[in-house]
Image (tube, rainbow, N blue to C red):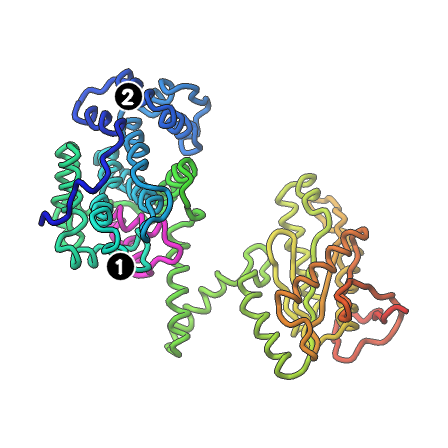
Amino acid sequence: MNHIALEKLPSPPGVAVKLLELFSSSDVSPNDLNDVIGADPALTGKIIKFANSPTFARRTEAQSLRQAIAMLGANGVKTIALSFSLTEIGDSDASAGFCYDSFWNSSLATAVCAKAIFGAVSQDADQGFLTGLLLNIGQLAMFCDNPERYEKMKADRTENDLSLVDIETEEYGESRYSLGGRVLANWNFPEAVAGAFAEFNPSSLDNLNSQLLDLARRMSYILLSKEPDYEIVKQFNEDLISASGLTSEEAEEVFRLVGKEHSQIALLLTYEHLPQRSLKEIELEAKLKIVEMSVSLQLTNEKVTEERNQLADIAFVDKLTGLGNRRKYDSVAPVELERCKRTGNSFGLAVVDIDHFKKVNDTYGHAAGDEILSSVAKRISNLIRIYDTAFRFGGEEFVVLISEADQDVCASILERLRLAISSESFVWEDLEIPVTISLGAAVFSSAGEPKGLDELFELADKALYEAKRSGRDQWRIADPANGEPRTWDVSPATTLPGLELSGGGDVLTPAE
C-alpha cells in the first residue's frame, strides 16, 4: 500500500547520508570515517566517549576520533556513528503521545540485542546492529504520516509494546516492517538492509535472518519493560537457546553483556534505562506477578500456592540478614495499622540505625560490614517478642513493628535492643569491633494518632535523628502530645504485662 506519505518522515541528517554512502563501499578507510564524522563535533564527542566507556574496559583512553576509530574498528565506528546520527531525527519531548527518545532508545536496544544474537551464531554482528536499529523505522513513518491517527490507535501503550505491531497492521493495512523497507529504499539504504525488512514477518519466521531479528525485538522488549509478560520472557529464553545453540549459562551471559552495552549507550545519549537484571531474575519477577494475580482471583491450586510461596521468599526477604525487606514492610504494616484502628489497640514503630557504619566498612572492609549487619539483625530478632516483626530497610537501617505496645512497652524494648548491641563487641576474624545503635520510635494510639503510616514513620525518623544528634547509642520516642522526641530513665522493676522477653532485666518508667 502507498497511502502513507513517506515524504512526511524527516530526512536523515547530512552526516547520516554521507555515512550511508560509505556503507555502499566495501573498503572504507579510517581517513574517510574521520573526515565524515569529524565534521560533526557533537557526534565526534559521542564516539570518543563510547570508545572510552566501561563496555570495552580499555587500559588507555582515546583522546581523538582517530584513536577511537583505531580502538573500535572502522566497521564498528561506521555503524555506531550512523545510529547516533539517526537518533537526531525528531524532538526529544513526547509529541502527540509519541516519544522520540523512547522510540530511539527502544531502537538502540534492539540494535544491541541483534548485534549480540547475530554474533552468537557467527553472523555479521555489525549488519545485525544496523538492521535492529532500523527495524521499527516504519512505526515512525506511521506516526509522522498522521500524528493524531497514530495517537488514537496507540492509546496508552509504550513505543516498545509488542502488541502495537498487530494493531498497526490492522489499522494501516501494512506492517511497520514492510513500510520500513520502503522508507529505507527511499533513503537509499543498502539493499542488504532494506531487503531484510521485506522478508521479516514475526508471524512467519521462515529464514534464519528473520528468526534472529525476532529474537532481538523480543529481547529488547524484555530489557526495557518494567513488568514484561511472563510467557514472552519464558518463550524467549527457550527460543534463544534453541536457535543459537547456547547453553542457559551462555544465554544469561549474552543478556548480561547486552544490558551492559545498552546502559552505556543510554547514559551517553541521556536515555532512560532500567537497572541490570538477569534473565532468571526477570522471569521470576514476571512469574511472581502472575501468581499474585492468580491469588487475587482466589485460585487455590496447590502447585500455584507453592510457587507463590517460593517466589514470595525471593521477593520479600532480605538476602543478607534473612529479615523481611522494604516490600515486606509495605505489605505487613498497613495490615497492622488497620487492625489497631479496628480493635482500638496501639502499636509502635521503631527505626534502628547502626552508628558510624560507614567507618566500620572503611576500616574493616565490606565483608566485615556484612557480617555485622547480619549479626545485628540476629540480635534484634532474638530480643523482640514473637508477635513483633523486624525488617531491614536497606543499608544499615532496620525497622521494628511493636505490636500491642504503648510508650512504656516501646521504651523497654528500645533500651533492651540498645544494651544488647552495645554491651558485647562483634567478632570478625579475631578482631573485636565495638558497635552501637541509635533508635527512634513513635506509637500509633487507639485514638487514631498519628493518622497514617507515613506520619508515624516520619515521627519515628525524627526521634532517631534526635538520638543521633544527641550523641548516638541512645533512643528517643516521639511525644504523643506534640511529636517531640523524649526519653525515659532506667529503674529496676518487674516485667511489664504482656512483655514476654527472654532473660528478664530492667524495665523503664517515664521520667519526671
- Range drawn in magenta: 215-243
For the C terminus, the image quarter is bottom right
In the rendered structure, the answer to whether residue 132 lies left or right of residue 320 reads left
Q: How many marks?
A: 2
Considering the numbered disc 1 on the image, is that residue within a helix, a strand or a loop? helix
User: Callout 1, which amino acid?
Assistant: Lys
Q: Position of residue 400 (x, y in %)?
A: 66, 65
Cα separation between marks 2 and 1: 40 Å
Percent coordinates x, y for residue 105 in the rendering: 34, 43
Q: Residue at x 16, y 26 (%)?
A: 24
Nearest the eye: 90 or 26: 90
In the image shown, does 348 or 247 lie closer to the viewer?
348
Residue 456 colored in magenta in the image: no
Please report the residue visible at 62 percent of the width from the left and 68 percent of the height from the top: 453
Q: Residue furthest left?
A: 1
Instruction: Report the residue marked by disc 2.
Output: 36
Residue 122 visible in the displayed image:
no
Q: Is residue 476 above or below residue 106?
A: below
Question: Disc 1 designates what residue?
Answer: 152
Please tell me which of labels 2 and 1 falls first in the chain: 2
Question: Left or right: where does residue 329 sit relative to residue 265?
Answer: right
Q: Nearer the viewer, residue 504 or 38?
A: 38
